[in-house]
Amino acid sequence: MEYQVLAEFVRVLKISKNSRIEAPLLQYLSIMIQNMNSDHSIYYCFSNDYINNIIGHKFEFGGDLALYYVSFLRAVSNKLNKDTVCLLLKVYGDSVVSFPLYNEALKFAHHGEKMIQTAIRALTLSIYNVSDDMVYQYITSAPVSKYFSDLVSSLSNQFFHLDALVHATEMRTNQKRKELLLETDKIVDDLYYFNDMLGVGQSRLSTVVIENLLRMLIFPILLPLLQLGQSNGSNLSAVTSFYTVSRLLQVIGGKGMFNSVAGVILYPYMTSSVRDAIERDSTESISHAKSILSEMGKVVSSSPETEGAENSSLPRDTASNKRSGILAHVFSDNPSLSLASLFLLFILAEAKDLHPLLAQMIGLNGMQNMIAVDGNIGNLLVKYMDQILNALLKVLASQPPFSILIQWHTGWFLRKLLILQGKGLGDHNFELLNSSYQQSRECLQKELDGCWFDHIPEVLRNEWPNCKAALEESSQCKDPFFVLELDDSQQATDGDATSYFAWKRMVETVKVFILYLQLKSCIFKGELLQEPLLNMSSTIADSSKTHASDIASASFGSEVSLRSGIPCTIAFSNAGIRDIYLIPKARETTGKVLLAEKHPFRSQRGVVLAIGPLAGLNPKVDEDHPTWLHLQIREFEPKLHKIKVGHQSSGMSNHVADGRWTLGFSNANACEAARLSILEEIRKQRSSVESILAPLLQDSYPGNLSETESQDE
């Protein structure tokens, strides 16, 4: 203050045109302001327009100067409070006419550098949290309020870019999913910025944010989607539209947002069913419904297609209803669209901020807390419960089956609706569910003939709690990203038959089987099973026996007994043809095939040269050379894969080529005998696995469909 340092800084800036001076000057100022702790220092620093003059200086931004400038603005904003913010305002009468810190910061709001964008958003939130009514009046009035519409416009463009990615056909599935995840992460970051603004709790700010989101994004998406408004030819696809609205509700939420979206969706069903109740009842809930109805009527009636809609009655027949509004999507033949629209209804129905009347109209949570109004106020999900359940069960029972992803998410919706219904399924729906269950069981039994049957019990135990948690996930927590990838999930995995893709197929088959077991439990017991019932007694009993064989613990280079070995030859690329012994051995659910060379000094012992898993060997005699036996060796290792995925990008290549051994025998009979010996050991191993899984594969686990069906009758 004594040496007028800030005035000197301003003078240096005015006479300097060199960024080599401006950058360090801004840096020194930032450091100085950040280290001010006394109120007197801050008041002096912010007084006399010194800071405003520096903020408003005409810098020529190039190189890193923008970073220094934004860092300086951020340092100033960190020292703002309700007492100091007024020192940076320019006021005329009772109105703010200029706020240089805020105005200059907004010029960098859409800067290409992510670090600068983040700093500006933090700065604006700092200002919103310390402002008074006079500042809010300035911020939320034109032309300054254009910032909020620009934010929504930018968000809208991101959703259109996301939609283009969803429908891109030139990218491989894995690459496309990676791009979609990156884009949705950016969108969610922006949505949380809106959520932070609403979290300030200032009504004027909240109103302008919500109005821009509704007017510029949500209504233009929902009205054409629900056939309540004209399409301008540049709308998002239906699936991306449902994703957009669902994500907005999950991240931003709030009473105004939930009630407005629900009002638009329920408008075709609300006008006829609520009219009488509105006329006869003057309670607070009905008054609120009346205001929603009036506002939605203004929005919808602006379209020529819906002129006079408020004076018309909802079509009485179910077929007409199912072809209109959101029900047209719920009953779509496209499962992706059907699940996406149902998901939006679930988010609305489970929202705590949703008005009780609207929650009752949707019908997911309103069963125990019915509102005492006219009986004409319907229950959308309850009214069409049987048809919706039937549509979902048809997806599960489809032949050929839909992708694992579609089946799994369909099961999630089915469980939600079964809980809501609180009673058994009808005969036809029972048949569909039973058909789907039998289909999943057959798929699992096919995997018992596959190359990963030995891992099925372990995968089932590991995936059981994960699947249970996924089924119990609430609509508010469930990521709607799944609706964007459902269509792509129908694509084949390039026809690759490696053990990696066989592993993926087996794991997915186990997950689907768990899904049906849990759905059956939900119907018969009213709850999910905590853990699978597996028959582990025989395994425990066998493991207590003393094994003379040392094959189970064999490793590369170790010694093993050759008494059960089958003599043969093998050709190594760098060691020529060598005489070896083939030793296949199963022990409970584990099995190995060893190649051992006779020990030079111990005739009944051998040294292990190679080890492979017994499962998946698929022994085949060569058609042209009956003394040659081909063995297929699994090279993919699930445990190592899990470690790699944890440390590397999800886009890593998993196309691991499987190994192949070709063994030579003295004659065709010896070759066939070796093949049969391998198959017998595989049979023993598979038998142990089947014994463990036996309780789960019974029709009576966890209940019997036909028994329940007869009880209902």
Image (spheres, rainbow, N blue to C red):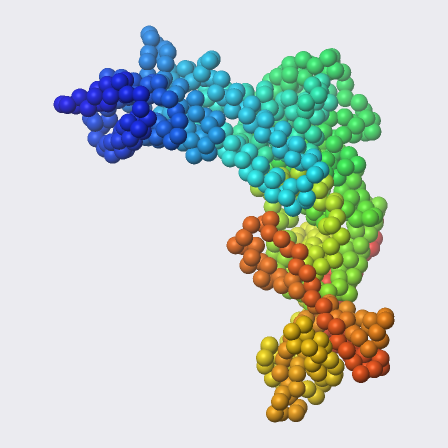
Q: Please tell me which residue is depicted at 47% across the width and 17% down the height of the picture.
A: 145
Q: Please tell me which residue is depicted at 80% across the width and 75% down the height of the picture.
A: 628
**Where is residue 274 drawn, in percent x and y?**
69, 22
**Whether residue 123 can be seen here:** no
Q: Residue furthest left?
A: 2
**Where is residue 294 drawn, in percent x and y?**
63, 16
Q: Nearer the viewer, residue 228 or 23?
A: 23
Quarter of the image with the N terminus is top left
Left or right position of 138 against 24: right
Residue 215 vertical placement versus 544 (above, below): above
Q: Tell me which corner region of the image, top left, top right, bottom left or bottom right, holds residue 300.
A: top right
Q: Tell me which corner region of the image, top left, top right, bottom left or bottom right, holds residue 13.
A: top left
Q: Tell me which corner region of the image, top left, top right, bottom left or bottom right, holds residue 238.
A: top right
Left or right position of 624 against 529: right
**Whether residue 455 can be seen here:** yes
Q: Nearer the viewer, residue 451 or 530?
A: 451
**Where is residue 587 drawn, in percent x and y?**
68, 77
Residue 648 vertical placement versus 480 (above, below): below
Q: Nearer the viewer, residue 107 or 390?
A: 107
Left or right position of 421 against 123: right
Q: Please tell me which residue is depicted at 65% across the width and 41% down the height of the picture.
A: 176
- Give the total number of marks visible in the rendering: 0
Q: Please tell me which residue is depicted at 40% across the width and 19% down the height of the picture.
A: 103
**Where is residue 521 drawn, in percent x and y?**
70, 54
Q: Residue furthest top?
A: 93
